[in-house]
Image (cartoon, grey):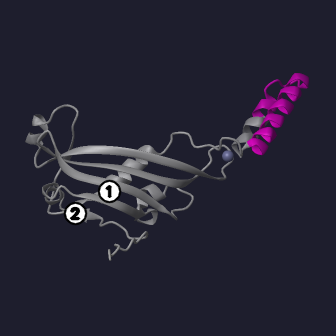
Amino acid sequence: MQTQEPVILSAELPETANFMRQVELNRTIEGVYSLAKLARLSEALVSNDGYVTTKIEFGRSVGFACVSAKVSATLLVKCQRCLKPLETEVAGNFKFALVHSEDEFELLPEEFEPFLLEGEQQSIIDLIEDELILCLPMVMTHENDCSDYMAKQNKKVKAAIEAEKESSHPFAALKSLKNDLSN
Ligand SMILES: [Zn+2]
């Protein structure tokens, strides 16, 4: 009878590794990190519940030691229009050539981004977090769910335009709308 390997879904990956050793082993690491461990990313989130899923590959590419990875996560951010929570899917990937010194930078073909190796162990989780931060959309708004909010704003704009027509102070109404919108 075949024994099946246990699947542990909540198992988190190591935060650091000796990258050059992983390259020698040609290692692929697949798994998750808890979002709660990503402090810099968490600042942009409404909640840091959940996980980032990642696959990290160490190996050689045209002779150069490399680390590459795919990352994806479902993040809860604040809608910039209605300020309510908004779920957004992000995904990205990166590839770095591992170098020991700045002199080695010069030897790299242009398409390689260098990663400077320092110390015994390097941080995997920092690379993953950097990538997720780069993946955050510039504008984060609901596609449809803001409609109530937007309808109210449109009404205010219309009312302000009407008021302006009748006003002897042409800019007073717009000014009050501006104050209103910035509240
Ligand atoms: Zn919204």
| Direction right: furthest residue | 166
State which quarter of the image contains the N terminus: bottom left
Residue at horizontal 51 percent and vertical 62 percent from the top: 48
Per the rendered image, the range of residues in magenta is 147-175
Query: Residue at (76%, 33%) from the top-left corner?
Result: 175
Q: Residue at x 12, y 56 (%)?
A: 24
Indicate left or right for 150 with 115 as reference: right
x, y (%) of residue 152? 81, 41
Q: Secondary structure at mark 2?
A: strand
The residue to which callout 2 is attached is: 17
What amino acid is at disc 2?
Ala
Judged left or right of residue 141, residue 70 is left
The residue mark sitting in front, 1 or 2, is 2
Q: What amino acid type is highlighted by mark number 1?
A: Asp
Between 114 and 156, the residue placed more toward the observer is 114
Magenta-span inclusion, residue 133? no
* Within-10-Å neighbours for mark 1: few <14, some 14–19, many 20+: some
Q: Position of residue 69 (x, y in %)?
A: 31, 49
Residue 138 sits above or below residue 16 on the image: above
